[in-house]
Amino acid sequence: LQSCGRYLLYTPETAMRTDNLLERMARLKNAKSLPLRLEIMLEDAYYQVKPPEGKRKAAKERDPLELFIQHITCERLYKDEDEDKILKFVRKLPWQNTQATLWLKKYLLDLSQHANYENLYLIASLLCGLAKYRDAFVIEVIDTLLEHIQTTIERNDFREMPLRVRQAKLLGELYNYRLVDSGVIFDALYQFIGFSGPTAYRCS
Protein backbone atom coordinates (compact mmCIF):
# COMPACT_ATOMS: atom_id res chain seq x y z
CA LEU A 1 0.00 0.00 0.00
CA GLN A 2 2.70 2.48 0.96
CA SER A 3 4.75 1.99 -2.19
CA CYS A 4 2.16 1.80 -4.97
CA GLY A 5 -1.27 2.04 -3.29
CA ARG A 6 -2.11 5.54 -4.56
CA TYR A 7 -1.07 4.60 -8.09
CA LEU A 8 -3.33 1.55 -8.06
CA LEU A 9 -6.22 3.50 -6.50
CA TYR A 10 -6.14 6.30 -9.07
CA THR A 11 -5.44 4.14 -12.14
CA PRO A 12 -8.80 3.46 -13.86
CA GLU A 13 -7.99 -0.21 -14.59
CA THR A 14 -7.29 -1.06 -10.93
CA ALA A 15 -9.23 1.64 -9.05
CA MET A 16 -12.35 -0.42 -8.21
CA ARG A 17 -10.43 -3.50 -7.11
CA THR A 18 -8.01 -1.47 -4.96
CA ASP A 19 -10.89 0.42 -3.35
CA ASN A 20 -12.63 -2.87 -2.50
CA LEU A 21 -9.43 -4.23 -0.96
CA LEU A 22 -9.02 -1.10 1.15
CA GLU A 23 -12.58 -1.32 2.45
CA ARG A 24 -12.12 -5.00 3.20
CA MET A 25 -8.92 -4.25 5.11
CA ALA A 26 -10.72 -1.55 7.14
CA ARG A 27 -13.55 -3.93 8.02
CA LEU A 28 -11.17 -6.70 9.10
CA LYS A 29 -9.20 -4.25 11.24
CA ASN A 30 -12.37 -3.15 13.04
CA ALA A 31 -13.67 -6.72 13.44
CA LYS A 32 -10.48 -8.24 14.88
CA SER A 33 -8.73 -7.37 18.09
CA LEU A 34 -5.27 -6.38 16.93
CA PRO A 35 -2.27 -5.12 18.91
CA LEU A 36 -2.17 -1.32 19.10
CA ARG A 37 1.10 -1.11 17.14
CA LEU A 38 -0.30 -3.15 14.23
CA GLU A 39 -3.56 -1.18 14.27
CA ILE A 40 -1.67 2.12 13.99
CA MET A 41 0.44 0.76 11.11
CA LEU A 42 -2.69 -0.32 9.21
CA GLU A 43 -4.38 3.05 9.76
CA ASP A 44 -1.28 4.92 8.57
CA ALA A 45 -1.11 2.80 5.42
CA TYR A 46 -4.84 3.21 4.76
CA TYR A 47 -4.92 7.00 5.19
CA GLN A 48 -1.73 7.43 3.20
CA VAL A 49 -3.46 5.85 0.21
CA LYS A 50 -6.91 7.26 0.86
CA PRO A 51 -6.78 10.42 3.01
CA PRO A 52 -9.94 11.61 4.79
CA GLU A 53 -12.10 13.98 2.77
CA GLY A 54 -11.99 16.72 5.39
CA LYS A 55 -8.18 16.93 5.42
CA ARG A 56 -7.70 17.50 1.70
CA LYS A 57 -6.50 21.00 1.00
CA ALA A 58 -8.42 23.03 -1.53
CA ALA A 59 -6.33 24.25 -4.43
CA LYS A 60 -5.42 27.89 -3.95
CA GLU A 61 -6.67 30.11 -6.75
CA ARG A 62 -3.81 32.20 -8.08
CA ASP A 63 -3.77 35.48 -9.94
CA PRO A 64 -3.55 35.16 -13.76
CA LEU A 65 -0.61 37.57 -13.77
CA GLU A 66 1.28 35.32 -11.34
CA LEU A 67 0.58 32.30 -13.54
CA PHE A 68 1.86 34.22 -16.59
CA ILE A 69 5.07 35.24 -14.80
CA GLN A 70 5.60 31.67 -13.65
CA HIS A 71 5.07 30.44 -17.21
CA ILE A 72 7.61 32.76 -18.82
CA THR A 73 10.28 32.34 -16.10
CA CYS A 74 9.93 28.62 -15.34
CA GLU A 75 9.03 27.25 -18.78
CA ARG A 76 9.45 29.63 -21.71
CA LEU A 77 12.82 30.94 -20.48
CA TYR A 78 14.35 27.45 -20.83
CA LYS A 79 12.50 26.32 -23.97
CA ASP A 80 12.29 29.43 -26.17
CA GLU A 81 15.36 29.91 -28.35
CA ASP A 82 14.70 33.63 -28.79
CA GLU A 83 15.97 35.22 -25.57
CA ASP A 84 14.96 38.70 -26.74
CA LYS A 85 11.31 37.60 -26.87
CA ILE A 86 11.38 36.62 -23.19
CA LEU A 87 13.04 39.93 -22.34
CA LYS A 88 10.26 41.79 -24.16
CA PHE A 89 7.62 39.86 -22.22
CA VAL A 90 9.32 40.78 -18.94
CA ARG A 91 9.70 44.43 -19.91
CA LYS A 92 5.98 44.63 -20.70
CA LEU A 93 4.97 43.50 -17.22
CA PRO A 94 3.14 46.10 -15.09
CA TRP A 95 6.19 47.32 -13.19
CA GLN A 96 4.10 49.81 -11.22
CA ASN A 97 2.45 46.77 -9.62
CA THR A 98 4.64 45.87 -6.63
CA GLN A 99 3.19 42.37 -6.46
CA ALA A 100 4.25 41.66 -10.05
CA THR A 101 7.90 42.45 -9.28
CA LEU A 102 7.75 40.27 -6.17
CA TRP A 103 6.40 37.36 -8.22
CA LEU A 104 9.08 37.85 -10.88
CA LYS A 105 11.86 37.84 -8.29
CA LYS A 106 10.35 34.82 -6.54
CA TYR A 107 10.20 32.64 -9.66
CA LEU A 108 13.58 33.75 -11.00
CA LEU A 109 15.20 32.61 -7.74
CA ASP A 110 13.02 29.55 -7.18
CA LEU A 111 15.91 27.35 -8.30
CA SER A 112 14.81 24.16 -6.55
CA GLN A 113 11.59 23.83 -8.54
CA HIS A 114 12.37 24.34 -12.21
CA ALA A 115 15.96 25.31 -12.86
CA ASN A 116 18.10 23.20 -15.17
CA TYR A 117 21.71 23.37 -13.97
CA GLU A 118 23.15 23.61 -17.47
CA ASN A 119 20.79 26.44 -18.46
CA LEU A 120 21.13 28.72 -15.45
CA TYR A 121 23.01 31.15 -17.66
CA LEU A 122 19.64 32.03 -19.21
CA ILE A 123 18.55 33.68 -15.94
CA ALA A 124 21.78 35.70 -15.86
CA SER A 125 21.32 36.62 -19.54
CA LEU A 126 17.77 37.81 -18.88
CA LEU A 127 18.90 39.91 -15.90
CA CYS A 128 21.76 41.34 -17.95
CA GLY A 129 19.33 42.50 -20.64
CA LEU A 130 16.92 43.80 -18.03
CA ALA A 131 19.63 45.77 -16.20
CA LYS A 132 19.58 48.42 -18.95
CA TYR A 133 15.96 49.24 -18.14
CA ARG A 134 15.33 48.07 -14.53
CA ASP A 135 18.69 48.24 -12.79
CA ALA A 136 17.16 48.65 -9.31
CA PHE A 137 15.22 45.40 -9.74
CA VAL A 138 18.31 43.49 -10.91
CA ILE A 139 20.27 44.74 -7.89
CA GLU A 140 17.43 43.61 -5.63
CA VAL A 141 17.45 40.14 -7.23
CA ILE A 142 21.22 39.82 -6.71
CA ASP A 143 20.91 40.94 -3.07
CA THR A 144 18.15 38.41 -2.50
CA LEU A 145 20.23 35.64 -4.08
CA LEU A 146 23.13 36.45 -1.73
CA GLU A 147 20.70 36.41 1.23
CA HIS A 148 19.37 33.00 0.12
CA ILE A 149 22.92 31.64 -0.10
CA GLN A 150 23.63 32.91 3.42
CA THR A 151 20.39 31.39 4.74
CA THR A 152 20.93 27.96 3.19
CA ILE A 153 24.49 27.84 4.57
CA GLU A 154 23.18 28.72 8.05
CA ARG A 155 20.49 26.03 7.92
CA ASN A 156 23.05 23.44 6.73
CA ASP A 157 20.31 21.05 5.63
CA PHE A 158 21.70 18.24 3.46
CA ARG A 159 18.43 18.18 1.51
CA GLU A 160 19.21 21.67 0.22
CA MET A 161 22.62 20.77 -1.21
CA PRO A 162 21.36 20.69 -4.84
CA LEU A 163 19.79 24.11 -4.23
CA ARG A 164 23.09 25.48 -2.89
CA VAL A 165 24.95 24.20 -5.95
CA ARG A 166 22.44 25.94 -8.25
CA GLN A 167 22.69 29.16 -6.25
CA ALA A 168 26.50 29.12 -6.54
CA LYS A 169 26.26 28.34 -10.25
CA LEU A 170 23.87 31.25 -10.81
CA LEU A 171 26.20 33.58 -8.90
CA GLY A 172 29.04 32.51 -11.19
CA GLU A 173 26.89 33.14 -14.27
CA LEU A 174 26.06 36.63 -12.95
CA TYR A 175 29.81 37.27 -12.78
CA ASN A 176 30.21 36.04 -16.37
CA TYR A 177 27.61 38.59 -17.47
CA ARG A 178 29.38 41.29 -15.41
CA LEU A 179 26.49 41.85 -13.05
CA VAL A 180 28.65 41.25 -9.97
CA ASP A 181 32.34 41.94 -9.46
CA SER A 182 35.12 39.65 -8.27
CA GLY A 183 34.84 40.94 -4.68
CA VAL A 184 31.36 39.42 -4.34
CA ILE A 185 32.58 36.10 -5.75
CA PHE A 186 35.57 35.90 -3.40
CA ASP A 187 33.39 36.83 -0.44
CA ALA A 188 30.98 34.01 -1.32
CA LEU A 189 33.91 31.58 -1.69
CA TYR A 190 35.21 32.49 1.77
CA GLN A 191 31.75 31.77 3.15
CA PHE A 192 31.58 28.38 1.40
CA ILE A 193 35.05 27.35 2.58
CA GLY A 194 34.61 28.29 6.23
CA PHE A 195 31.25 29.58 7.30
CA SER A 196 31.37 32.02 10.24
CA GLY A 197 35.09 32.53 9.54
CA PRO A 198 36.65 35.59 7.89
CA THR A 199 35.08 36.94 4.71
CA ALA A 200 36.96 38.46 1.81
CA TYR A 201 36.19 41.94 3.12
CA ARG A 202 37.52 41.15 6.59
CA CYS A 203 40.72 39.66 5.17
CA SER A 204 41.46 42.51 2.78
Image: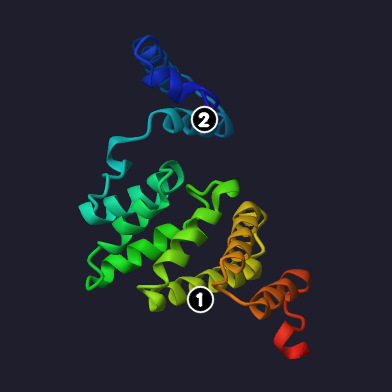
Q: Quadrant of residue 148?
A: bottom right
At horizontal 73% and vertical 69% (from top left) the residue drawn is 192
What amino acid is found at the position of numbered circle 1 in the picture?
A: Asp
Per the image, the residue denoted by label 1 is: 143
Query: Of callouts 2 and 1, which one flags the residue occurring earlier in the amino acid sequence?
Result: 2
Task: Give how far across and how far down residue 60 sits, in percent.
Answer: 26, 49
Count residues near mark 2 (Cα–Cα under 10 Å), then give few for <14, some for 14-19, many for 20+: some
What amino acid is found at the position of numbered circle 2 in the picture?
A: Glu
Name the disc covering residue 33, or none.
Answer: none
Left or right, 189 with respect to 116, comes to right
**Disc 1 on helix, strand or loop?**
helix
Per the image, the residue denoted by label 2 is: 39
Left or right, 25 with respect to 180, comes to left
Left or right, 200 with respect to 66, comes to right
- Mark 2 to mark 1 CA distance (whole Å): 52 Å
Give the vertical position of 5 relative to 184 (above or below).
above
Q: Quadrant of residue 137?
A: bottom left
User: In the picture, which quadrant includes the C terminus?
Assistant: bottom right
Q: Nearer the viewer, residue 109 or 153?
A: 109
